Image: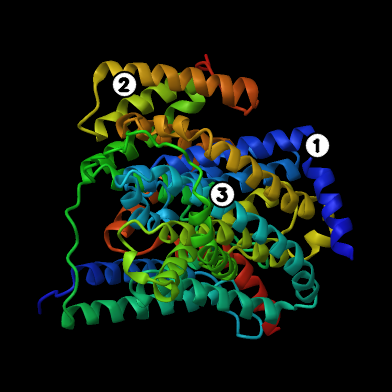
Amino acid sequence: MNIRAPKDFWSGIMFIAFAAVAMLTARGYSLGSAGRMGPGYFPMLLGGALGVLGLILVARSLVIEGETIGRLRLLPLVVIALGVCLFGLAIERLGLLVALIAATAVTTFASRDSRPLEVAALALVLAVFSVAVFVLALRLPLPIWPAL
Amino acid sequence: MDIFSNLALGFGVALTLENIAYCFAGVLLGTLVGVLPGIGPVTTVAMLLPISFTLPPVSALILLAGIYYGAQYGGSTTAILVNIPGEASSVVTTIDGHQMALQGRAGPALGIAAIGSFFAGCAATLAIALAAPPLAAIALQFGPAEYFSLMVCGLIAAVVLARGSVIKAVGMVILGLLLGLAGTDVNSGIRRFDFGFQGLADGIEFVALSMAIYGIAEVAHNLEQKSESAVVTSAIGSVWPTAADIRHCLPAILRGTTLGSLLGVLPGGGALIAAFGAYTLEKRVAKPPRSFGHGDIRGVAAPESANNAGAQTSFIPMLTLGLPSNPTMAMMIGAMMIHGIAPGPRVMTDRPDLFWGVVASMWIGNLMLVVLNLPLVGIWVRFLRIPYRLLFPSIIVFCCIGTYTINSNVFDVFVMAFFAIFGYLCLKLDCEPAPLILGFVLGPMMEENLRRAMT
């Protein structure tokens, strides 16, 4: 069997995976009946429908010719996701300034055009701007400095 | 007529110094993100959602609404001058708009885009004022069965209007509905799909999900594209179109406004579909049609009128039924719920100041936008020189701050990182995110109404 439409094939796999997780998890909740629906009824229904759609996509992709997936460039994505997680880890303990500068510094590695001096300047501008606008002007509850 | 007293009430609310300031801030920001490619109104509204905590609800909605229709004005500037859509809804404007710019007619192209948008904005505001009260009156009679059917209809329309494969769009809707079900079930008190995470007790945070998809995944996607922007820097010249241009465009503006207003109301519609529809229609009916694609001014006037009309009439289902027709409207519903206002037909009767204040502010905002866009276009062009390598880290840290502040919960930031990866894969697989977002918002509402309708 050859995959003739990779985009459809992998979309189908993704749908089936989500459907499987939904249905397996929903087994733990009581189903009830159509007249008195339990917490598991609607998720089970949706999971089943999603699974069927996934199967249709996979089956079709083996028969009908379709588009190939463009080249995946995972490095920028991973770098950005790391930057976001770093912000999450730092914000409460180390405060906005540290979190922001760290996240900016890491995410710029996602682009090959970044220049070190520019990044430093950008991080500084963003930090000053965010503290001034979000914390001082709009009074959002964000810690500025590391909590000691 | 009731409508005059209502509009008077609305202008009374919208014309306070404070609300004029928020309206101005909204359209200013909207124009800015409209001009800048790679950052759209959904992300901006999401980033400002935490800020709107601190504002009174009317001011918050006025600010957020301004961003959405402001972006429709700004998007055309980039489309005409750089041949890149500043906003998804100005994709078709690039076709004739940039050709005009190359022929040295950038000024009139920008002018007619603003004039068309202004006319459409006024007409659409009037349409909301006329259509919303009777619709809300009907909606008050709706029971759970009607609501459920309405939501199914809405989701089907969203699927039909989505680009690409229907099966994938349906799949994304269902996936969105499923994601929306995570968290504590209101009927049984059971926590569903929390996978042992305390942070999922209240479900997946909507802001985290939408910023992940429209903010961060988009950035990762954009970084792959080689961006070679050639700004038309030659003098823009007079932005005022000649009288002949206006006469030539008038039918196009009228048709664009009408079609845009109608398409904006449809779920899954809004500005994007309106612009595409209007351009296609114009190509069919306008005479002579041959000049389209070679810098026909009507090819700018029609879609630009339509996207602005569509952006505004998409408020109708949100304000009268409490149902979002596109992701930005879903965000508005989020903003209303933050303030403890349940979106739906009761808003108009219980909070007339809110409803009519927002409607009146749209007209004021459109007036401001013409001033912002015509004489000040040179300033906006300068923003286009900001390189993306400086822009994208800013987008990401603002997304982080926005997601964190919505609940002061670090878990939401990690949720955002997770869905950013998911969103990127969806983009790569041609699975459109808009149906997913609509499904996500409607998930709990649909389940609730289905349950009640069946018992």
Asked where in the image residue B453 lies, by quadrant, the reply is bottom right
Q: CA distance from mark 1 to mark 3?
A: 21 Å
Residue B76 located left or right of residue B427? right
Where the N terminus of chain B falls, by quadrant? bottom right
Residues under numbered marks 1 and 3 in contact, where contact means CB atoms less than 8 Å apart? no
Q: CA distance from mark 2 to mark 3?
A: 30 Å
- Which residue does the image show at 82% across and 44% down from the upper left? B13
- Please report, as a chain letter, where disc 2 is located: A
The percent position of residue A83, horizontal first and vertical second, equals 35, 33
Amino acid at the residue labelled 3? Tyr
Give the residue pinned by disc 3. B68
Q: Is residue A79 above or below residue B361?
A: above
Residue A28 located left or right of residue B336? left
Q: Nearer the viewer, residue B115 or B416?
A: B115
- Please report, as a chain letter, where disc 3 is located: B
Q: Nearer the viewer, residue B366 or A54?
A: B366
Give the residue pinned by disc 2. A119
Residues under numbered marks 1 and 2 in contact, where contact means CB atoms less than 8 Å apart? no
Amino acid at the residue labelled 1? Thr
Give the residue pinned by disc 1. B16
Marks 1, 3 in one chain: yes
- Which residue does the image show at 51% across and 26% down from the upper left? A92
Tag shown at residue B437: none
Where the C terminus of chain B falls, by quadrant? bottom right
